[in-house]
Image (tube, rainbow, N blue to C red):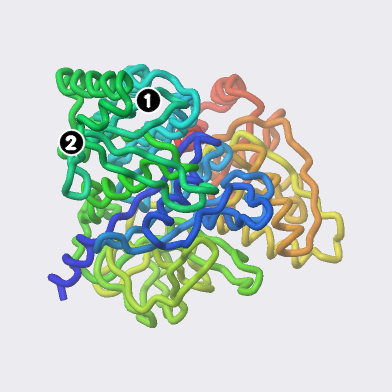
Amino acid sequence: MSSHITAESARRRTFAVISHPDAGKSTITEALALHGQAIASAGAVHGKGDRKGVVSDWMSMEQDRGISITSASLQFEYRGCVVNLLDTPGHADFSEDTYRVLTAVDAAVMLLDAAKGLEPQTLKLFEVCRARRIPVITFINKWDRPAKDALELLEEIENRIGIKPTPVTWPVGIGGEFRGVIERIAIDGRRAEGMVRYERSPGGQQLAVTEVLGADEAAARFGDEFGRALEESELLGEVEADFDQKTFEAGQTTPTLFGAALVHFGIGQLLDLLVDIAPAPFAREDVDGEPRELESGFSGFVFKSQANMNASHRDQLAFVRVCSGRFERGMQVTQAQGKRTMSTKYAQTMFGASRDTVEEAWPGDIIGLVNASGLSVGDTIYAGRPVEFPPLPAFAPEHFGALQMHDTSKAKRFRRGIAQLDAEGVVQVLYSERRGEATPVLAAVGPLQFEVTLARLAAEFDVPAAIDHLPYQLARLTDADGAKQLLAAPGIEVFTRPRDGAFLVALPNKYRIQTLLNDYPGLVLEPLLAGGQG
């Protein structure tokens, strides 16, 4: 069995697509699925007429606004590999969800808008990947539109992030006049000696037309544009900007491609590159820093929980990254945190909001456990030798609001909805002695989390509610003694967080921290993980 586990693990490629908002993340997710023949045609982010919306954006708010609010999982086979692709929210307000997804992958694809280059959220995501030692492939998107100079973009990445770009493809034609690319390394076992020419498919919903041109024909058809691209590609070799597997896996370099996801330029090369160079699953460290070998008994951890993904199901799904061993549907597993055993009779693989029953899964796969009561984000499950993986930290909230329901006759439904959204990590739900249990306080990284909470309470639980914004901007962790000391302190509020029993102190500004430390010697005030790091 161990050799079979090793072989199946080697076939897996599990990665996330991450970016600043509006860089084209959901579009490229859809395009990758199209190239993997997992769907018949790609949808627009805003479906119009008879065009459908993107598969990965299944929530009504996502489809209405054209942004990703929650992460989504897609699985398909390509070139003998099983691709587990996780789409993530791009908006900074949902950094915590993106951070959780990055704990569940072995590599990441970072999208850059060719006209905008590095943006604030891009910088933060690169730092998260660096901290978690996640190899990053960079895809410079929207090259079919006016863009910055290609060499300028590379310089910006290296100077501002400290990671050296190593272009795998190089554009022929400036931004807005995209002709194709020069392949600088062999992709899918081959390398075009001249260039790969692109031509948009009618309507843009099918694969782009590609044509391999020899050097002489490329020069004859594209003249100075091809000549300039060739010179720049050769210059990159002279400054040692060539792909290297070891430095890529070490996070010191980022293989870089140029393309346009909306018209499917360069997407096939990106997918081939992921299969060729992205690392397969490896042994993960437990809470004690000991590796859980792939051939050990089954283990996995919950990185996401989501309810009501499909109105016809109305159930809860725990997203589990398989870390070791073989998962079999129906097997008994143990929850490490509570030592409870549970059945896995209802296990599924996801493709956006669509689901299929899964009979077995291997390291690297993402499975959904349906109505696995008691499982929370960050929990470890295992069979055989016990293991517990490191917990997922909660982010430091920067926005606080008291939640008020409109109809008190729906109090029971209100409590159930709040508990569900808290378990999913949509927001942090807090309670204080001052307000009582009837008025929970929501704590969020960004205000859009409040909008999602209100929309889902109304749509999924039929509980209209409102937010009364509070004058706090940051939070610190304290202990039980500190919570008692600060109950009467002016200008702040002490909360309990039911999901883990922590005590949080909400403060109006950073200066209040120092006055509290002066007024209460020995007071514990510890920072949470900053939201900007997610």
Question: Can you say whether 230 is above or below 458 in the image?
Answer: above
The secondary element bearing badge 1 is classed as loop
Name the residue carrying label 2: 193
- From the viewer's perspective, tell me whether residue 298 is left or right of residue 484: left
Looking at the image, the residue that sits furthest to the left is: 3
Please report whichever mark, 2 or 1, sits nearer to the chain's N-terminal start.
Answer: 1
Work out whether 415 lies above or below 511. Answer: below
Give how far apart the Cα atoms at labels 2 and 1 are: 17 Å
Looking at the picture, does residue 152 appear above or below residue 357?
A: above
Q: Nearer the viewer, residue 246 or 233?
A: 233
Q: Amino acid at mark 2?
A: Glu
Q: Which of these two is toward me, 237 or 291?
A: 237
Q: What's the residue type where badge 1 is placed?
A: Gly
Q: Circle 2 sits in a helix, a strand or a loop, which is it?
A: loop
Q: Position of residue 170 (x, y in %)?
A: 29, 29
Residue 507 in view: yes
- 419 vs 519: above or below: below
Q: Position of residue 496 (x, y in %)?
A: 61, 48
Image coordinates of residue 242 in percent, x first then y, are: 18, 29
Q: Which residue is mark 1?
A: 173
**Where in the figure is residue 177, as x and y percent of width and height?**
44, 27
Query: Mark 2: few, some, or many residues within 10 Å (few <14, many ≥20)?
Result: some
**Which quadrant holds residue 515?**
top right
